[in-house]
Image (cartoon, rainbow, N blue to C red):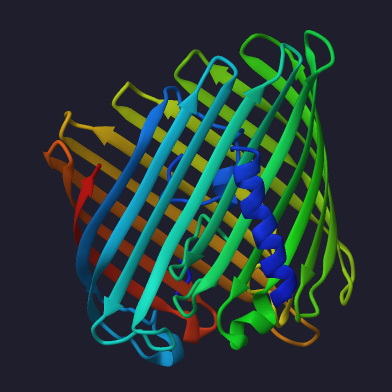
Amino acid sequence: MRILSPFFLHARLVTLIAGALALAFLTGNSAKAQGLLGIGHEGSRVTESVPLKVGVGAWAGYDSNATTSLNGKSEETAFYGGRASLRYAYVTSQTRFDLRFNFAGLYQEAGGGSLDDMIYNSRLRADLGHRFNDRVSMVNNALVAWEVEPDFMLAASSALRDDQYFYFYDRAALWLSLTNRLTSVSSYAIEGVNFESNRLAATEDRVTHTFGQQMRFAWSSQTSLKAEYRYSKTNYDKADLDSNSHYLLAGVDQQFGDTALLTFLGGAEHRDYDAFNALWKPYAEASLLYRLSDATTLRWLARAGMENTEVAGYENRYSIRTGVTASHSVSDRLGVSAGVAYVYSDLEGVGSERDVNESGVQANAEVTYALLPNLDLGVGYQYTSYGSDDDDRDYDRHRVSVAATTTF
């Protein structure tokens, strides 16, 4: 034990709808998904148009624990495979649209335990912001992913690397200026996950619909106060964990000149499970986007609240998640990026079952170098440590990789 301290058809149909919304609405960092990364992220932050760019390449590396010690067995392996990417951005005085796609397939020499020897990680992300006039605007953020890697900031998959999963998210919001100071923001979001194996699908496959109404008051040119009500409904394909949630939240958005934006929302969630007693829990989310210079960007995210991931066998999971990422362009050719994420979870047992505490750290770093105008070389490292009162879920993992990518 290590604690680091303080339905198929329906899901696939909804997934297709989410993907269609992303393209129909023409809606960051492509290495990440929604989850926590939707906090403080409205529409697109792209500032200039980017013509269609396609990248292809190869990568290889070493994984010290490809099975994340599933069933008590750790399996190290070499891996190699191909990569592909796509990037497009469109910017006018009224519209910002950013499209990113990343694909990676890899073959594991020693296999991956419950996984196939050949596995895939791909993400399509689309962000849109459009201003109809001085009073009305809309934003849309969408993501569709087919992955296998645990992502502590996505907060949708298993903490273990034990199955391919299909994840989708789409959020649309309409901004309406009622007065010079008062703004209404009405939103709808859909999120779901679908696992490939029947074992995890039976407990994890689900779809969540969230409706939100926020009122914003411009206290000053730099400060906006906000109050929000959310209603969320989660339906599981098979597990008896369906629930309805009501959120009562208040917070502030604080701009610090042109360099930083801090957002905060806090309050309470009332969750009513079909199979368990209703309960109140505190909820909070925060983000900071800080541009230290044209070459350096830092982003911090945090959330505390009840979650839908890996709840089967318990009454609820309450988690605190936080993470920071940074990127820096050393020169026109050399770039570095790094990030670290932390999660702490309390799982309340059903009846006489004991409660379980879990925590984990996930850190990564990458260096890229433009050898030629259209040829990039990269070296990456990732470390993951996860501890649980359930000893079968303890694991440490190191992963190193090298890659070459050409863009045209």
Residue 165 location (% of width, % of height): 54, 71
Residue 5 location (% of width, % of height): 50, 63
Q: Quadrant of residue 138?
A: top right
Residue extending farthest left: 371
| Point 81% across, 85% down: residue | 351
Q: Is residue 269 left or right of residue 327?
A: right
Q: Is residue 340 left or right of residue 34?
A: left
| Point 45% across, 22% down: residue | 47
Depth check, front residue: 196 or 34: 196
Depth check, front residue: 75 or 300: 75
Residue 95 location (% of width, % of height): 58, 23
Q: Quadrant of residue 2?
A: bottom left
Asked if 122 appears above or below 7 in the picture, the reply is above
- Residue 157: in sight, yes or no? no
All told, the count of numbered labels is 0
- Residue 336: in sight, yes or no? yes
| Point 43% across, 50% down: residue | 101
Task: Indicate the quadrant containing the C terminus: top left, top right, bottom left or bottom right.
Answer: top left
Q: Quadrant of residue 201?
A: bottom right
| Point 55% across, 14% down: residue | 93
Depth check, front residue: 406 or 142: 406
Residue 265 location (% of width, % of height): 70, 37
Depth check, front residue: 92 or 287: 92
